[in-house]
Amino acid sequence: MAILTTRNFHWVGGPLDGTYTGVDAIRDVGKIHEGPGADEGSVGQVEEASNPEGASVTANVAFEGKQPIRVPYMLTYRDARIVSETWQINAKPAKTGY
């Protein structure tokens, strides 16, 4: 099995929509704090799934600030390295209140 070294960051929806590959591109996405003004975050409903080929961790994340943002979040690991990270704007939050 080849070791995956490319880390992909996927932002689905909103002003950052797109796929970013490589450390420099991903670092630039960190400018989110300059955008909607998300001041504080909370994490709920974390789940992990794994098998011998890798693992995934998902969570429901809520950012509060000038504009509340709800996002499902997923990390995918292979060989103990993050190979993919996905944040998706949730236009209609679940009734569970995350």
Image: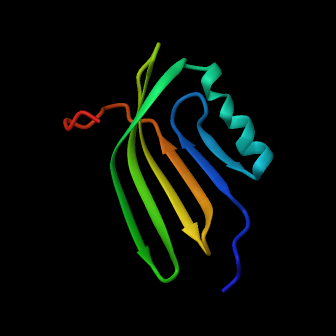
Q: Nearer the viewer, residue 61 or 13?
A: 61
Residue depicted at 68% across the width and 58% down the height: 7
Q: Nearer the viewer, residue 79 or 7?
A: 79
Residue depicted at 44% across the width and 30% down the height: 41
Counting labels gives 0
Extreme-top residue of the structure = 66
Extreme-left residue of the structure = 95
x%, y% of residue 87? 50, 44
Q: Is residue 71 above or below residue 82?
A: above
Q: Is residue 91 above or below residue 6?
A: above
Extreme-right residue of the structure = 24
x%, y% of residue 53? 52, 80
Instruction: Quadrant for the C terminus, please.
Output: top left
Q: Is residue 14 above or below residue 26?
A: above
Instruction: Quadrant for the N terminus, please.
Output: bottom right
Decide if residue 65 is on the left or right side of residue 3: left
Residue 49 found in image quarter? bottom left
Residue 95 found in image quarter? top left
x%, y% of residue 19? 64, 47
Instruction: Specify how the rendered protein is coloured.
Output: rainbow
x%, y% of residue 75? 51, 57
Residue depicted at 20% across the width and 38% down the height: 96
Residue 64 found in image quarter? top left
Q: Is residue 50 above or below residue 41?
A: below
